[in-house]
Amino acid sequence: MIKEDVNGIFFSTDVALGLIPLIILILTVANTNIDYTDLYLEKQYFQKAQDTAELMSTYTEHSDQTLLQKVSNAISENQNKKIGIERAKNITSPFFERTIGKMKYRLEEINYLQGSEIISNGDIKTAKNVGVAVKCYGNYLFKLYVWQ
């Protein structure tokens, strides 16, 4: 009779120890905070930035020059950087109004202007999620930020 009780205790202990990893797994899954909104927004902003930068490198209106060619020419034709930036801003402003709409954006040139802003319609420091795209034309490297 005593032998049967000992076997039952070992069996019960073995089952209880086997359930501990399962309990830990269930508690871990229950405590996980799954928030997909930030990941979704990051992906959406990244795609919007990439698409807009791609349009800038392929979009032409009446001339055979793309938007990035026009901006590069506006910057390179002026020895005064401020005048070049102002001309580039005038070139890109209508494009961004039609393309991006209500989203915030910032376009800067990294190589020649050392990160100077060409055009922007918001404060990037307050943005939580930002999509970034980089395009090169000639010696100029353009970086586009997009956020809500």
Image (cartoon, rainbow, N blue to C red):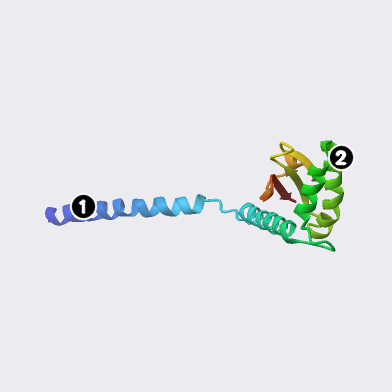
Element marked by disc 2: helix
Q: Residue 10 got which mark?
A: 1
Quote the CA–CA distance across marks 2 and 1.
85 Å
Q: Tell me where residue 83 appears, x and y as whole percent.
A: 86, 39
- Name the foreground residue: 61 vs 139: 139
Element marked by disc 1: helix
What kind of residue is marked 1?
Phe
- Name the foreground residue: 133 vs 14: 133
Q: Is residue 138 left or right of residue 24?
A: right
Q: Residue 91 got which mark?
A: none
Q: Residue at x 73, y 50 (%)?
A: 147
**Are the residues tagged 2 and 1 within 8 Å (C-beta)?**
no
Is 62 located above or below residue 31 in the figure? below
- Name the foreground residue: 39 vs 121: 121
Q: Residue at x 75, y 46 (%)?
A: 107
Q: Tell me where residue 2 appears, x and y as whole percent.
A: 13, 53
Where the N terminus falls, by quadrant?
Answer: bottom left
- Which residue in the structure is indicated by mark 2? 83
What kind of residue is marked 2?
Ile
User: From this viewpoint, is residue 34 visible?
Assistant: yes
* Mark 1 neighbour class, 10 Å CA radius: few under 14, some 14 to 19, many 20 or more: few
Q: Is residue 103 left or right of residue 31?
A: right
